[in-house]
Image (cartoon, coloured by chain):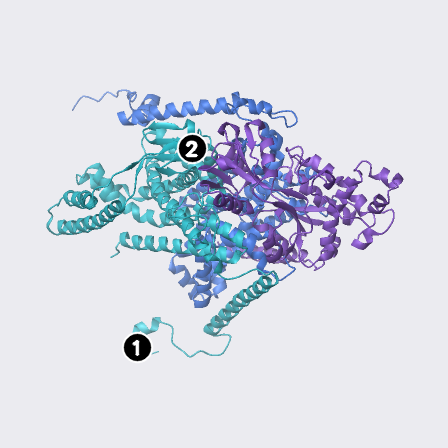
């Protein structure tokens, strides 16, 4: 009995020491200087806040590798800074924790289907450098319900995720159109989709991209109809901490680089060839052969070349991740401005 | 009584008292109500078991080529689609850990299991056990993080699956247990300020759900730290679980302290032992022996409660299982995944609860007269 | 030490001496350590607090509870009081609190009944019943509650849609929109009748206590049922009739997308309730079994020898003694049900956590949101433990 107590006490002491040694080590390892770019360089990786799982945008595959539209944007930042798109660490964030994670420096940049609104821009200490996807909230119903317009949804049960702008848009819309509805409010995406598919709700409302993704995932997509009404504007884009204009510039121009690459018809496959033979002045500036646009951003001059070789141009990213989940680009706001869309990059000069 | 008694061979007991027929009679049909209950229950069990075998084995699809789940969809719920497990089992077990390095996570799970088994054997309850724990936990840290011995560095946010569940539960216990002993002693202390602090801590934590502590760790904790400093999400959740576990374990330990006869304390005082000598040599060795079975039960509770980190987006076993079915091709096979994940939890918890029951019986053996 | 006139009691207590300012004085050391520990705790709290204040300022996050009066704008599916999205956050949180209480109170009652039945079944002579309930207890306790809730919710969603709803009786519909039951249109008379019933219940209990006390005094048993009949049935009926006996049935019917009218049990509520009750019943069954087994067999045999009927043996001899073992662990199970009801957030039942969570997400005021959640649960927990401690003290063995 005596021996047990003695051993036990020593074990306690050892454990306490272990704990004392482990905790501060962890905490200090994450000290972030005020300058995000320097911190990223010192760390050797970009830390990117992403969704915990949203088909097409950010989702781990069977081998545990993150894939999606937002993931490619994270990779493009790493390519711009390091010339190596694999130097990214992904931190899955929930709808609640995303802004805290960014504010506290746990992540450098948030690519997480975040809607740019005035209150978020001003009161959360954040900046939204660009819009990489124009979305809008819509409704999806089952074809068998025979509904063709959102105005026929009076009395319906509607599935919605809480804590996002979606929920508030829904109540605003219902009040404006004098529509009574019963909400089913479920936090996790896969749960809310399962509830809609099982018939727990008559309609499911979220951003149009989410609706298209859900619809295309169904065994028979034609059984579901996305109603024509779009009840809100949802400009989705990256968010960074306020007060670090240089890093915000890098995030902003990384997006414009993939847009301009599409304008100039440079793809991941043709980038090297374009570098060798392209004579268009803007292409040469983009690829870093002439001028020093990269230096002005504090990066290597070949930054955009690295991005394009790693993830391709905007059209390629879209086609790789969003077309398979059923999103149309033609005639949507995400088409290039030359084709009637809103995607427009300022000149590279 | 002059006749000598002729010994007659013992007659076998009547068939109505021993043997299978008697057993059936006593245990299944001792009255007409009992008989009716037996028949109804047996009928239902057989019916459900057959239904489950038909769904889970006969009609089931075990694998499909490259994510083509049409074969599963065609079943329309008449059979299980175990193909989702065949395809996703490594994701469910290891999360986003690099695919080629997953043997390291697997090895860590084996070390955890070995550690549990070694700790469960009474012949290993010696001083060296603490060293074994430190050694094993260090080995797990090295394996999971890497960066030394030619292992590639794997940042913490890529860990996932069963390892996270085991880490949260085991480290939770390893740190909460010493904390709980201090708090339990503090709660019985004669120093009013220390006693008050311990009482406030225990009652505050036990009065609120674990979810609210996890939310606090997830959204509120970063506000507590000075600017520029932050602690990663897993560690924050781990701290919340340690604080939570510490309060519950403290009550278990306090129960053990209270059952100790007063004479033991008085005898130690009479010997002139200091407070820490009295506690370390007399009180704790006896009290902790009493609380091992409830301690194991509390540990089972934490093991299950780690699943709540789902709500703050950490990839433990349950979250990994749910994330596995986000991919469009695999949506809608929740039941199969839940059954698999449930089975894994059950294996661990069942083993621990059986162990706790045996241990309790063993420790109480000297009391049985 | 030749003096013998000293009071021997004073020898037992340690002699009172003035505090010496020396390390060898136990009291000085006690004070020192207390100052050190309190100092560490206070400075840590102060450090965290100043960090928080600084961070809130730098990040321009609003503080204070002013947001409670603002318009919530969040839709709530089920509510015990009138609510619409134009109401304030305060009212939305009230709705959430009532929803938490609704599931906790019903859950506690059902889990107690169900758990007790299973606990008794585990001691049954019937092998099938005994084995089945033992398996149930073992399996249900070894699976995480969250997993069980998700499982139940997935199962309930497998029910047919409203148009193919199961329709076992007139006005009763079971579909994936929940269970619909016929109800009556609630009017003032019904509220009055309810009040009368509660008053009658109190009166009946008081009468029964008096009757028992008199029976103990003179040994004459007194029937309680006539008084109960008057107080519990006649009084509410009279109150109802006095206001014109209104009775308008409210039968649910399929109109448009959903059933209109009647009483609704939503799948979310049902899944949460089923999960909580099934899970906690597994623990309560073990507590009840241990409690009954803790009563020595001699007590039962002695009661039988006195000629008590089996029901009376259980009610008058076994249960009162078993309760002493059962009540303390039962208290923590009741607390667990209440706290576990916060898992509602995972399956879309809008309890206090779910609504406070949405609130903190919309307003960005995390500290206030979490403080509200913690305060609510602390209040509920302390009330339950207070009540159960009082009950425990009442039934505790009076030691002589």
C199 shown above or below C286: below
Q: Provide the chain ID for the residue under circle 2.
A: C
Q: Provide the chain ID for the residue under circle 1.
A: C
Chain colored blue: B
Chain colored purple: A
Callout 2 and callout 1 share a chain = yes
Determine which residue is flagged by label 1: C6
Q: Dot 1: few (<14), some (14–19), or many (≥20) neighbours within 10 Å?
A: few
What hue represents chain C? cyan
Can residue A341 be seen in this snapshot? yes
Q: Sequence-wise, which precedes: disc 2 or disc 1?
A: 1
Taking the spot 64% from the left edge, 57% from the top edge, the residue there is A27
Find out whether the residues at labels 2 and 1 contact each other: C-beta distance under 8 Å. Answer: no
Determine which residue is flagged by label 2: C256
User: Element type at marker 1?
Assistant: loop
Question: So how many labels did they put on this image?
Answer: 2
Q: Is residue C398 left or right of residue B216?
A: left
A323 shown above or below B210: above
- Quarter of the image for residue B340 reads top right
User: Element type at marker 2?
Assistant: loop
User: Could you tell me which quadrant the N terminus of chain B lies in?
Assistant: top left
Q: Looking at this view, is C132 or A146 the one in front?
A: A146
Q: Position of residue C226 (x, y in %)?
A: 14, 43
User: Could you tell me which quadrant the C terminus of chain B lies in?
Assistant: top left
Can residue B127 be seen in this snapshot? no
Taking the spot 22% from the left edge, 48% from the top edge, the residue there is C196
Q: Looking at this view, is B299 or B74 the one in front?
A: B74
Q: Looking at this view, is A262 or C196 the one in front?
A: A262
């Amino acid at each position: 009995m005596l021996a047990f107590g003695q051993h036990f006490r020593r074990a306690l002491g050892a454990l306490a020491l272990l704990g004392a040694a482990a905790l501060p080590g962890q905490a200090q390892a994450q000290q972030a200087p005020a300058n995000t770019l320097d911190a990223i360089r010192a760390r050797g990786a970009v830390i990117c806040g992403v969704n915990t799982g949203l088909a097409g945008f950010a989702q781990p595959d069977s081998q545990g590798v993150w894939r999606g539209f937002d993931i490619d944007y994270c990779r493009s930042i790493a390519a711009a800074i390091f010339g190596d798109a694999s130097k990214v660490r992904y931190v899955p964030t929930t709808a609640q924790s995303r802004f805290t994670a960014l504010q506290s420096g746990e992540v450098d940049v948030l690519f997480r289907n975040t809607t740019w609104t005035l209150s978020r821009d001003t009161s959360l200490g954040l900046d939204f450098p660009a819009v990489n996807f124009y979305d809008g909230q819509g409704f999806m119903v089952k074809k068998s319900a025979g509904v063709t317009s959102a105005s026929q949804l009076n009395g319906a049960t509607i599935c919605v995720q809480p804590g996002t702008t979606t929920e508030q848009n829904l109540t605003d819309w219902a009040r404006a159109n004098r529509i009574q509805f019963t909400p089913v409010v479920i936090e996790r995406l896969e749960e809310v989709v399962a509830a809609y598919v099982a018939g727990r709700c008559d309609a499911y409302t979220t951003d149009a991209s989410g609706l298209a993704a859900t619809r295309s995932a169904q065994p028979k997509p034609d059984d579901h109809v996305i109603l024509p009404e779009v009840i809100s504007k949802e400009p989705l884009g990256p968010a960074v901490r306020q007060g670090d204009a240089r890093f915000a510039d890098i995030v902003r121009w990384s997006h414009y680089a993939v847009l301009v690459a599409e304008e100039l018809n440079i793809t991941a496959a043709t980038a090297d060839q374009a570098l060798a033979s392209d004579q268009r002045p803007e292409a040469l500036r983009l690829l870093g052969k002439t001028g020093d646009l990269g230096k002005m951003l504090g990066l290597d001059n070949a930054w955009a070349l690295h991005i394009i070789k790693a993830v391709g141009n905007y059209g390629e990213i879209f086609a790789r991740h969003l077309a398979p989940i059923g999103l149309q680009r033609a005639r949507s706001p995400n088409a290039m401005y030359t084709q009637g869309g809103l995607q427009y990059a300022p000149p590279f000069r | 009584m002059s006749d000598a008694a002729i010994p007659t061979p013992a007659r076998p007991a009547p068939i109505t008292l021993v043997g299978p027929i008697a057993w059936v009679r006593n245990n299944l049909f001792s009255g007409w109500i009992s008989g009716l209950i037996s028949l109804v229950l047996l009928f239902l069990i057989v019916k459900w078991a057959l239904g489950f075998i038909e769904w889970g084995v006969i009609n089931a699809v075990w694998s499909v080529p490259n994510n083509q789940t049409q074969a599963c969809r065609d079943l329309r719920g008449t059979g299980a689609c175990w193909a989702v497990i065949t395809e996703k089992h490594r994701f469910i077990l290891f999360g986003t850990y690099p695919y080629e390095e997953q043997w390291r996570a697997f090895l860590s799970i084996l070390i955890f299991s070995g550690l549990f088994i070694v700790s469960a054997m009474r012949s290993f309850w010696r001083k060296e056990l603490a060293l074994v724990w430190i050694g094993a936990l260090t080995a797990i840290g090295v394996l999971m993080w890497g960066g030394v011995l030619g292992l590639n560095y794997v940042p913490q946010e890529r860990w996932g699956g069963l390892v996270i569940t085991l880490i949260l539960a085991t480290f939770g216990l390893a740190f909460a247990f010493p904390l709980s002993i201090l708090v339990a002693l503090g709660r019985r202390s004669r120093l009013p300020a220390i006693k008050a602090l311990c009482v406030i801590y225990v009652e505050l934590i036990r009065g609120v759900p674990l979810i609210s502590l996890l939310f606090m760790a997830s959204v509120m904790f970063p506000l507590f730290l000075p600017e520029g400093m932050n602690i990663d999400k897993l560690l924050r959740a781990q701290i919340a679980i340690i604080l939570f576990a510490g309060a519950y374990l403290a009550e278990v330990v306090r129960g053990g302290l209270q059952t100790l006869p007063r004479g033991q304390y008085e005898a130690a005082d009479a010997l002139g032992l200091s407070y820490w000598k009295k506690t370390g040599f007399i009180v704790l060795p006896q009290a902790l022996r009493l609380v091992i079975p409830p301690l194991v039960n509390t540990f089972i509770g934490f093991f299950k409660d780690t699943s709540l980190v789902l709500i703050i987006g950490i990839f433990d076993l349950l979250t990994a299982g749910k994330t596995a079915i986000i991919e469009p091709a695999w949506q809608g096979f929740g039941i199969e995944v839940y059954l698999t994940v449930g089975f894994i939890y059950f294996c661990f918890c069942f083993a621990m609860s059986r162990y706790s029951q045996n241990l309790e019986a063993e420790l109480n053996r000297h009391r049985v007269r | 030490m030749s003096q013998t006139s000293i009071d021997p009691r004073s020898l037992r207590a340690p002699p009172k001496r003035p505090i010496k300012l020396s390390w060898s004085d136990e009291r000085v050391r006690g004070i020192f350590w207390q100052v050190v520990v309190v100092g560490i705790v206070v400075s840590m709290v102060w450090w965290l607090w100043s960090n928080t204040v600084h961070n809130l300022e730098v990040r321009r996050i609003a503080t204070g509870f002013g947001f409670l009066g603002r318009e919530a704008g969040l839709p709530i599916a089920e509510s015990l009081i009138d609510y619409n999205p134009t109401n304030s956050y305060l009212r939305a949180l009230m709705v959430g609190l009532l929803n938490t209480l609704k599931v906790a109170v019903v859950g506690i009652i059902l889990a107690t009944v169900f758990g007790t039945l299973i606990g008794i079944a585990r001691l049954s002579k019937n092998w099938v019943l005994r084995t089945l309930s033992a398996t149930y207890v073992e399996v249900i306790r070894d699976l995480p509650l969250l997993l069980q809730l998700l499982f139940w919710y997935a199962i309930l969603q497998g029910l047919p849609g409203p148009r193919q709803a199961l329709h076992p009786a007139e006005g009763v519909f079971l579909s994936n929109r929940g269970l619909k039951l016929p109800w009556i249109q609630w009017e003032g008379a019904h509220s009055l009748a309810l009040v009368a019933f509660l008053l009658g219940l109190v009166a009946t209990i008081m009468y029964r206590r008096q009757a028992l006390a008199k029976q103990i005094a003179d040994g004459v048993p007194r029937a309680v049922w006539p008084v109960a009949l008057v107080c519990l049935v006649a009084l509410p009926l009279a109150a109802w009739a006095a206001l014109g006996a209104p009775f308008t049935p409210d039968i649910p019917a399929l109109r448009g997308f959903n059933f209109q009218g009647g009483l609704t049990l939503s799948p979310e509520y049902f899944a949460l309730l089923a999960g909580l009750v099934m899970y906690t019943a597994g623990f309560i069954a073990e507590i009840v079994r241990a409690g009954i087994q803790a009563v020595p067999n001699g007590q039962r045999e002695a009661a039988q020898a006195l000629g008590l009927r089996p029901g009376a043996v259980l009610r008058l001899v076994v249960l009162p003694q078993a309760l002493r073992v059962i009540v303390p662990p039962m208290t923590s199970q009741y607390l667990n049900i209440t706290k576990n009801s916060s898992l509602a957030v995972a399956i879309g039942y809008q309890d206090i956590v779910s609504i406070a969570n949405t609130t903190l997400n919309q307003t960005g005021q995390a500290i206030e949101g979490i403080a509200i959640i913690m305060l609510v649960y602390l209040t509920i927990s302390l009330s339950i433990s207070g009540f159960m401690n009082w009950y425990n003290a009442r039934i505790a063995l009076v030691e002589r």
